[in-house]
Amino acid sequence: MTAITRKDNHPDIVLIGAGIMSATLGMLLKELDPSLSIEIIERLDHAAAESSDAWNNAGTGHSAFCELNYTPQRPDGSVDISKAVKVAESFEQSRQFWAFLTQHEFVELPTSFIRPIPHMSFVWGEKNVTFLQKRYEAMQKNVLFQEMQYSDDHSQLTDWMPLIMEGRDPNQKVAATYMPLGTDVNFGALTRAMFHCLKDMEGVTLHFNQEVRDLDRERDGSWEVSVRDRDTHERRKIHAKFVFIGAGGGSLPLLLKSGIPEGRGYGGFPVSGQWLRCTNPDIIRQHHAKVYGKAEVGSPPMSVPHLDTRMIKGKQELLFGPYAGFSTKFLKKGSFFDLPFSVNLRNIRPMIAAGLHNIPLTKYLIEQVSQTPQERLDALKRYFPEARLDDWELEIAGQRVQVIKKDEEEGGILEFGTEVVSAADGSLAALLGASPGASTAVSIMLSLLEKCFPEQLRTNAWQQKLREMIPSYGQSLGDNPALCHAMRTYTSEVLDLAPAE
């Protein structure tokens, strides 16, 4: 059937992908400049269906309280907490923005997307216990982490996490940190709430079941966005001054299609995820925490195991994982041709170099893919000694694409964080990468505004509005105890986040 081409339209902004990043950027821009016209394009039939979905998202409320991979140990034995401070401050900015949305009734009850829950780190073995104690001592020096508690006493740990201590060898050397200020965030619910608000705003249109097929730079510096309706096969062109590619794993192919010089040499390595999901309500009720462990020696940062309490659709759930898998898809509902079609002459060398430098990752993925149910259970039993296979089922999580970028020395390296790649003139930006991702969406979008809207950002109007939405904007909470306490008190009250007990 011949596709029908509709008349072109000319919004100010095009947001590709209806996930947490596009929702956050859309809300920020409409608050900063209500006159902006925005068109949002999503290839699936509803918002937050890929990485932002609660079952697909591996990071619910990353705030650096319990993630040990954010605090590496230096060669001299000391612990570097700089990344943890950065992530914690970013999460505080997210909380402030969500409090603003709640106060102004852009979202309904905050309990629909965020709830208090303790964040814990748990280790065993003398070496790991020593590391955890050093980490705790280093973090205690920063106001962001001063409410953290540490213990290596079995009775105290039993009070904190009974499921993990039940049936454990009483002579095993163990330790944990406990942070009562932790939260669980359902980013799927939050994303859908923001899009529900956006679609009713003047100048905003939201399209589902439509996908972007191509991006072309026009002579005046704007962008022609080619869109195809997946149901009717109808095609249309959109002309926009600014394009944001926030399509999760699908961002890389679109960045490459844009042809901007800044995107040359980028590649991606897809990794799928799996969870063990508890099906026994009695067990679920016994665990009320996010307990993160330490990745096995030689394992990548993405493999940090955790026994994770989550609230999904008003119901308490318990997950353990993640277990990694491999697929050539860049999206859970993508194509098996995503990876091969992403390879080109500009990125093949970095991708090969990154592969050669990350043989342990390849080995890890092969081992994970070939795991038996009993081997998955054995991994769980390190955290829950009394676990039985009958109480758990395998749940397929989302896809993530680890960024591969050019490196002068190595040829190509894997980038395990998130990265905004933008055109020199600020007319296009793409978000690549994964964790901590959604939890730091607000700070990531603020950095995007700095790159792509520098003139507007310098105006008094934008500066004043940003400080209204994010009161600590431009200030460091880690260096200002009074401000940190004030912001936490404010967001806790608005978001109904009484500290976990």
Image (tube, grey):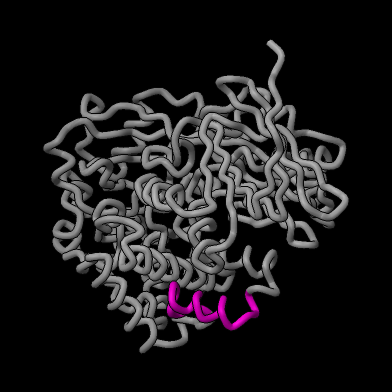
Is 470 contained in the magenta span?
yes
Q: Which residues are magenta?
A: 457-473
| Left or right position of 498 against 478 | left
Q: Quadrant of the N terminus?
A: top right
Residue situated in front as seen by the camera: 408 or 153: 408
Residue occupying the point 77% across, 39% down: 257
User: In which quarter of the view is residue 143 placed?
Assistant: bottom left
Whether residue 118 is situated above or below residue 188 in the rendered picture: below
Residue occupying the point 47% across, 30% down: 45
Most common SS among magenta residues: helix
Instruction: Tell me residue 266's x, y (percent).
Output: 75, 46
| Left or right position of 260 against 53 | right
Furthest residue in direction left, as rendered: 282
Residue situated in front as seen by the camera: 106 or 433: 106
Instruction: Tell me residue 314's x, y (percent).
Output: 21, 44
Whether residue 354 is situated above or below residue 466 in the rendered picture: above
Whether residue 28 is situated above or below residue 486 in the rendered picture: above
Residue 247 in view (yes/no): yes
How many labels were placed on the picture?
Answer: 0
Residue occupying the point 25% across, 27% down: 389
Residue situated in front as seen by the camera: 41 or 272: 41
Instruction: Tell me residue 194's x, y (percent).
Output: 41, 52
Whether residue 172 is situated above or below residue 450 in the rendered picture: above
Residue 435 in view (yes/no): no
Instruction: Tell me residue 50's x, y (percent).
Output: 48, 37
Furthest residue in direction top, as rendered: 1
Residue occupying the point 49% across, 82% down: 476
| Left or right position of 485 against 345 | left
| Left or right position of 453 against 64 | right
User: In which quarter of the view is residue 380 placed?
Assistant: top left
Is 277 contained in the magenta span?
no
